[in-house]
Image (tube, rainbow, N blue to C red):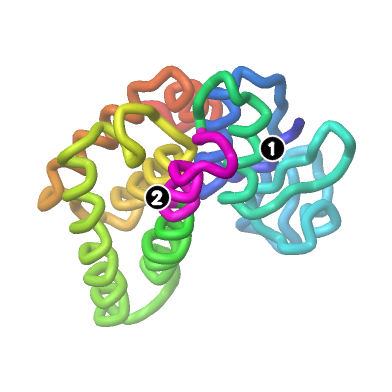
Amino acid sequence: MKLYFSPGACSLASHIALHASGLPFSVEKVNLRVQPHQTESGADFSAINPKGYVPALQLDNGELLTEGAAILQYIADQAAGKALAPANGTLARYRLQEWLNYIATEVHKNFSPLFYPGSDEAKQQAWDKLTARFALLERTLAQSPYLLGAQFSVADAYLFTCLSWSRYVQRSLADFPALIDYQKRVAALPAAQAALKAEGLAD
């Protein structure tokens, strides 16, 4: 498998999951700051993934899988022994999907206005929406180490990635001590350390 990624982007979640899975994989960096987007080897990324964004996972049979939530579950299912996702068909699996959907639509997307030009008012509105979402996550993670309880899952890789963006947009999570502890807990995992180091993001 080959993961197309951009350092620190949402593809970091898939990168962490791949390291946690123990599966063989390679990576190729995509420069999203140039048009057309180019891979590190000089290929036009839009020719690889017409959607034009990361993550994209090239499977061993040559097919391309896109969308973070789908990629994360695919990785987990290829390494069932690692318990990165509950078994298909169980209520716990639907709880995982519930969290993946929440992170994608309520956390990930609400960060977007903070990365692009816009008024201070619009950015503050986006942050206010995020802090309302963080309040729910704070309550959850004050009661358990990970989103699904005691076991790290691919949903944690995704949430960790999104929470890491707060420092890039110069916003503080000081009002959410459980989220800060959670970030530290996930960052200390060997899979997170390996992915952060590979993307040049390790402290």
Label total for image: 2
| Identity, as a three-letter code, of the amino acid under mark 2 | Cys
Secondary structure found at label 2: helix
Residue 139 forms part of the magenta stretch: no
Among the 4 quarters of the image, the one containing residue 35: bottom right
Vertical order, 22 against 161 (above or below):
above
Q: In which quadrant of the rendered image does the C terminus lie?
A: top left
Among the 4 quarters of the image, the one containing residue 116: bottom left
Extreme residue toward the front, this view: 90
Vertical order, 118 against 200 (above or below):
below
Residue at label 1?
Answer: 3
The percent position of residue 24, horizontal first and vertical second, equals 71, 20
Vertical order, 33 against 121 (above or below):
above
Residue at 55 percent across and 35 percent down: it is 87
| Identity, as a three-letter code, of the amino acid under mark 1 | Leu
Q: Main secondary structure of the magenta part?
A: helix
Determine which of the numbered discs, if any, sits on residue 38 in the image: none
- Find the magenta span and give its range: 85-99
Q: 34 or 14, which lies in front?
A: 14
Q: In which quadrant of the rendered image does the N terminus lie?
A: top right
Residue 98 forms part of the magenta stretch: yes
The percent position of residue 15, horizontal first and vertical second, equals 57, 34
Residue at label 2?
Answer: 162
The percent position of residue 202, horizontal first and vertical second, equals 41, 27
Residue at 60 percent across and 29 percent down: it is 18
Residue at 79 percent across and 62 percent down: it is 50
Q: 60 or 123, which lies in front?
A: 60
Q: Neighbour class for label 2 at 10 Å: few (<14), some, many (≥20)? A: many
Q: 51 or 42, which lies in front?
A: 51
